[in-house]
Image (cartoon, helix red, strand yellow):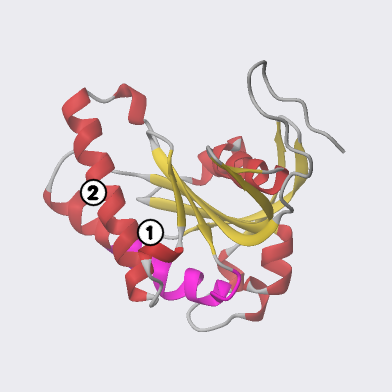
Amino acid sequence: MTVELPRGRRRLRHPPGPEYRSIFVVDIAGFGRWSNPHQIVARDVLTHAVRDGFRAAGIRWNDLGVQDRGDGMMVLIPPQVSKVDILDPAIPRLIDQLGRHNRASAPRIRVRISLHAGEVHRDAHGWVGSDLNTACRLADADPVRAKLAGDAVLVVSDVLYQSVVRHGYRRVDPAAFGRVEIAEKEVREPAWVAQVS
């Protein structure tokens, strides 16, 4: 199979195959309504909180595929990292760091976090794939936005809920998650949402 690229670009004879990753997406709620200085502060606080969360789980930042999204970020996590480590301690530590900021400074940073897993492709420009799209749609879905009451809400895909969350590893409480139906663009599937702060 030959993939056609724009004029002047070389053709890829065989695009590289997909790679399995856990997919973590975080979006800051209300980001576009803030002044530029507040946006800069929020991005800095979020980046440090996410880094600290992964560090607390023993996950090296350089092992992750990180893409800036302006009002958030996508993090692609290698398959050897347990999803349990992402759910506890990485996400609770991240939320704790945001809470510390919110109690002491402005702006109040509220986030929607999604966690999914699947096949993604890496190219010269970053990461791409339908599973990555799904993770982004989960974070942006109306039922998830509606559940954001405190500093953070977490949505996990149905496959992640069934394979990890429902088993109650460590401090993960399956009873805290409620099932919602996601209908965002091309994504039509159930997911599970928990208010985590």
Q: Which label is found at residue 45?
A: 2
Q: Is residue 105 left or right of residue 134?
A: left
Q: Is residue 119 left or right of residue 59?
A: right
Q: Nearer the viewer, residue 118 or 35?
A: 118
The answer to whether residue 108 shows anywhere in this view is no
The answer to whether residue 195 shows anywhere in this view is yes
Which is more N-terminal, label 2 or label 1? 2
Q: Nearer the viewer, mark 1 or mark 2?
A: 2
Q: How many marks?
A: 2
Q: Is residue 182 above or below residue 171?
A: above
The spot of residue 181 in percent (x, y) is 73, 45
Q: Is residue 138 left or right of residue 72?
A: right
Q: Residue furthest bottom?
A: 170
User: Which image quarter holds the C terminus?
Assistant: bottom left
- Who's the residue at 20% across and 58% down the image? 100
Q: Is residue 14 above or below residue 5?
A: below
Q: Secondary structure at mark 2?
A: helix
Q: What residue does disc 1 label?
A: 197
Where are the magenta residues, as a range?
79-96
- Distance from disc 1 to disc 2, alpha carbons, whole Å, reads 17 Å
The spot of residue 94 in percent (x, y) is 34, 61
